Amino acid sequence: MAMNLLQAWGAAKKRLEAAGLAGPVIDARLLVEAAAEATRIDIVTDPYRALTPQQEATLEDYLARRERREPVSHILGRKGFWKIMLQVTPDVLTPRPDTECVVDAALKAIPEFERFSMLDLGVGSGAIILAILAERPNAKGLGIDVSEEALAVARDNAAHLGLGGRVALLRGDWTAGLSDESFDLVTANPPYIATDVIETLEPEVRVHEPRLALDGGPDGLDAYRRLAPEILRVLKPGGLFFVEIGHDQKQAVEALFRAAGAVDVSTQQDLSALDRVVMGKKRPLETAG
């Protein structure tokens, strides 16, 4: 006898709980919705709708993959971030709520209809730059990544969101080759996990996420040492920067940006009250008194 949506969700929750997975309720719902081509509203309003044999087979495949610790974002090939939906592959970091703090801080600092140019370093899936451009219609941006595979994902996401005409996505080594004082805003979510910590992470991250986007060197700060002076170089006078950090890196990263000449340096916490975004600006041009 075919399972209905409610039964499928309940059975999926039990399987993921038995596998010891975190967040089994949400993961189960997402996998059932995708396999059954249903929505959250369908589960509430039509809970006894039967799954077809093909849908049951698809759900079985999804659950088996999740039990093997494959991330839901890789199973489904997509992940919601801020107010947009992004394509996700193993070539890019899965966008996380922590990174939404970068978007939130930047949007709070920039009026809705202001014209500005932005640079996103280590663009990955395009999460940060596309979320910002989607809400700032007069902005244009450049995303840089060393991975051509990641850039292909970002280009697809930009096209699907109708933002391809306002963002350029190029392969490069951070800011190498970019002109001085070119951007009003710079964002980055660089690799910041210490090398020896990576092997202690959950399999969803350790096995399935690109190591290049995780490994921040022996102390997790390698990228910031290079980026701090370079971000200040490419920012226009008075321009703003927002970079994601590890929860214990506030003092070190703030110090690097202050040493590079940044002013008004501060740190915003995430929803768990952990330090998450270091921000500041390039000193404005002096004006006559």
Image: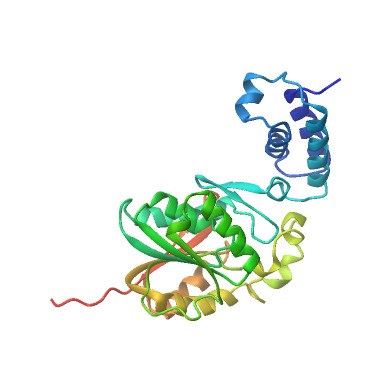
Q: Could you tell whether 132 is left or right of 156 in the image? A: left
Which quarter shows the C terminus? Answer: bottom left
Is residue 274 shown to the viewer in this render?
no
| 17 vs 168: above or below | above
- Report whether 161 appears left or right of 34: left
Q: Position of residue 20 (x, y in %)?
A: 80, 44
Seen at 63% across and 22% down, the residue is: 44
Left or right, 25 with reference to 279: right
Residue with the most extreme right position = 1
Q: How far across and down, in percent of the image, does residue 269 sit?
A: 49, 55
Q: Position of residue 72 (x, y in %)?
A: 71, 46
| Labels in figure, total | 0
The image quarter containing residue 47 is top right
- Residue at 77 percent across and 24 percent down: it is 7
| Residue closer to the observer: 287 or 258 | 287
User: Which residue is painted at 65% across and 76% down in the image?
Assistant: 217
Residue 90: quadrant of the picture = bottom right
Q: Quadrant of the N terminus?
A: top right
Q: Is residue 15 left or right of residue 29?
A: right
Whether residue 185 is visible, yes or no, is: yes
Q: Position of residue 19 (x, y in %)?
A: 83, 42
Q: Which residue is at a point 36% across and 76% down the rendered structure image?
A: 181
Of 156 and 279, the residue lying toward us: 156
Q: Describe the colour scheme in one phrase.
A: rainbow
